[in-house]
Amino acid sequence: MPTYECEVCGMSVNATCGKCDAPLENGDVTLEDGSKVQVSKCPNDHGMIKSPLCCGRDMVCKL
C-alpha cells in the first residue's frame, strides 16, 4: 500500500477505498494543458481522489 508523506512535517497516511477497502494506488492524471496531477486510484475502478495535502502542499507517495 502506498504511503503518502508530508515533506514539511513528516505526517504520513495510508488510504483505502471506502467501497471495497482495497489499498488505493498512486497515479497521475494529465490535464488538458499538459500538466499532471497526482491522484490515488481504486484498483477496482471505484474512482480516484486528488492525493492528500498537508502543510498546504501535496504529500509525496512513498511506495
Image: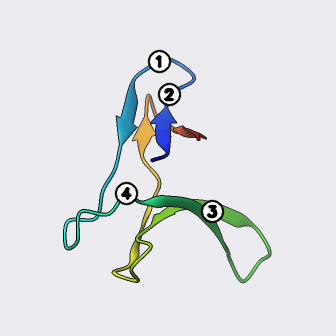
| Residue type, mark 3 in image | Val
Distance between the alpha carbons at the discs numbered 4 and 3: 19 Å
Mark 2 lies on residue: 6
Mark 1 lies on residue: 10
Considering only order in the chain, which callout, 3 or 1, is on the residue closer to the N terminus? Answer: 1
Mark 3 lies on residue: 37
Foreground residue among 13 and 63: 63
Distance between the alpha carbons at the discs numbered 1 and 2: 5 Å
Mark 4 lies on residue: 23
Q: Position of residue 54 (x, y in %)?
A: 42, 33
Who's the residue at 23% across and 71% down the image?
A: 20
Q: Position of residue 59 (x, y in %)?
A: 52, 38
Q: In the figure, is residue 30 to the left or right of 58?
A: right
Who's the residue at 37% across and 57% down the image?
A: 23
Residue neighbourhood size for the residue with mark 2, other residues' Cα within 10 Å, grouped as few (<14), some (14–19), many (≥20): some
Distance between the alpha carbons at the discs numbered 2 and 4: 19 Å
Q: In the figure, is residue 34 to the left or right of 22?
A: right
Q: In the figure, is residue 62 to the left or right of 41?
A: right
Asked if disc 1 and disc 2 are in contact, CB closer than 8 Å, the reply is yes
Element marked by disc 2: loop
Residue neighbourhood size for the residue with mark 4, other residues' Cα within 10 Å, grouped as few (<14), some (14–19), many (≥20): some
| Residue type, mark 2 in image | Cys
Residue neighbourhood size for the residue with mark 3, other residues' Cα within 10 Å, grouped as few (<14), some (14–19), many (≥20): few
Element marked by disc 4: loop
Distance between the alpha carbons at the discs numbered 3 and 2: 17 Å
Asked if disc 4 and disc 3 are in contact, CB closer than 8 Å, the reply is no
